[in-house]
Image (tube, rainbow, N blue to C red):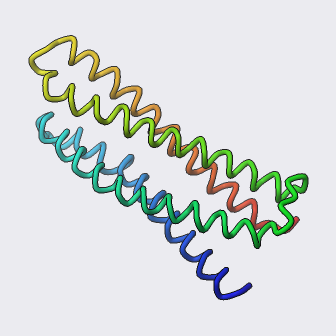
Amino acid sequence: MTILEIISLYIHLVASVIFVGGSVFMWLALLPATRNEGLDRQTANRVLFVASRRFGRVVDVSLGLLIVTGLYNATWYLPDMNFSTIQGRLLLTKSILVVIMIFVIYFNNLYHAKKIVRLSAIADKDARAGDELYRIRRLSRVLSAVSLTLMFLVLLFAVMLQIPP
């Protein structure tokens, strides 16, 4: 293993820890805390919005690093790009899961987050907006759970790739 391969693998691992760890924190700590600590809705929404926005920047950088280092790592990990081997099929499956995960994450964040912020501002005054906000939040939580599940599947495939054929 060359020094460049070691550095690339290190960056890949650190970026994945930040990305997955931060996502787990948001899902298991921050989200429940804003619901269960007696915060009024507006304050809770504001905290979630600000935290999500900041973490979104971290996600963008982490995912960028993961994609670049992942592509580079694939060139030395599977130099012949033979996807008929077990390692090749695992890497291909992991790559497909990553693409799906990125789509789900960005669709959820770009589409639902903006609607949630807009509807939160008027939900107390408009019953239909409140109902729509509730529906979108539920769908957003489901998509967040799907994203988290995909993250753990990607990690599982990463581990499986370390098992010698």
Q: Residue shown at 37%/26% (left/top)?
A: 138
Q: Is residue 165 above or below residue 143?
A: below
Image location of residue 29, percent across then percent down = 33, 51
> Is residue 97 toward the left or the right of residue 49 in the image?
right
Image location of residue 76, percent across then percent down = 76, 73
Specify the farthest residue to the top: 128
Specify the farthest residue to the bottom: 3
> Is residue 24 toward the left or the right of residue 55 in the image?
right
Q: Is residue 163 above or below residue 55?
A: below
Q: Which of 99/26 is in front? A: 99
> Is residue 38 toward the left or the right of residue 54 in the image?
left
Q: Which of 127/119 is in front? A: 119
Q: Residue shown at 26%/52% (left/top)?
A: 51
Q: Is residue 140 above or below residue 106?
A: above
Q: Residue shown at 14%/39% (left/top)?
A: 38
Q: Quadrant of residue 127?
A: top left
Image location of residue 149, percent across then percent down = 55, 43
> Is residue 32 toward the left or the right of residue 129 in the image?
right
Q: Is residue 6 above or below residue 99?
A: below
Image quadrant in which the N terminus is located: bottom right
Image quadrant in which the C terminus is located: bottom right
Q: Quadrant of residue 135?
A: top left
Number of numbered discs: 0
Image location of residue 40, percent across then percent down = 11, 36
Q: Residue shown at 51%/42% (left/top)?
A: 147
